[in-house]
Image: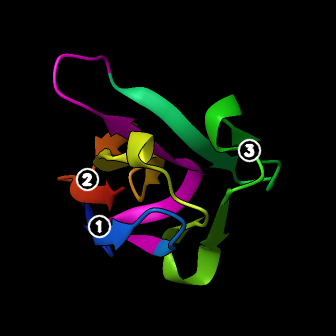
Amino acid sequence: QVQLVESGGGLVQAGGSLRLSCAASGSIFSINYMGWYRQTPGKQRELVAHIPAGGRTNYADSVKGRFTISRDNAKNTVYLQMNSLKPEDTAVYYCNAEVVLTSRSIVVRWGQGTQVTVAS
């Protein structure tokens, strides 16, 4: 089994910064990709940023130039550095990963979510 545990959410003033972390643990052989999504009430979950094993990142247009995704493969951890935060960034942020297990099966897992609130 694999678990993703997120941390780093909270309340911040507009223009401020937060750094989210997501650590994967369990029967991991390798991780194909990791990413961050966010969701607000009544809306679909949307992609924020994505980073595959090869390291070529992908961002939603709304966060380009403000957010940076990175990963530490040795720690099976993905980070999301969020700068110049805006009230519209307020959401529950979810970590996502496609994991190759030690059995060589491939599974997709989600974290439990962490709340980010940006006050105006």
User: Quick one: 30 or 114, which is closer to the camera?
Assistant: 114
Instruction: Identify the secondary structure beneath mark 1.
Output: strand
- Give left or right: position of 52 versus 45: right
Instruction: Identify the secondary structure beneath mark 2.
Output: loop
Q: Main secondary structure of the magenta part?
A: strand
Q: CA distance from mark 1 to mark 2?
A: 6 Å
- Give left or right: position of 58 versus 40: right
Instruction: Determine whether 55 is above or below 22 in the image.
Output: above
User: Quick one: 84 or 61, which is closer to the camera?
Assistant: 84
Amino acid residing under circle 2 = Gly
Q: For residue 24, say whether it is visible.
A: no
Amino acid residing under circle 3 = Lys
Please say if the residues under marks 1 and 2 sit with CB atoms less than 8 Å apart. Answer: yes
* Extent of the magenta region: 19-44
The residue identified by callout 3 is: 64
User: Quick one: 38 or 55, which is closer to the camera?
Assistant: 38
Task: Please tell me in which quadrant of the rendered image residue 119 appears.
Answer: bottom left
**In front: label 2 or label 3:** 3
The residue identified by callout 2 is: 111
Mark 3, other Cα within 10 Å: few <14 / some 14–19 / many ≥20:
few
Amino acid residing under circle 1 = Glu
Instruction: Identify the secondary structure beneath mark 3.
Output: loop
* Residue at 48% over, 49% down: 100
Q: CA distance from mark 3 to mark 1?
A: 22 Å
Q: What x and y, as percent, mark residue 70? A: 66, 67
* Residue at 33% over, 75% down: 8
In the orientation shown, which residue stands out farthest toward the bottom?
A: 74
Q: Earlier in the sequence, mark 1 or mark 2?
A: 1
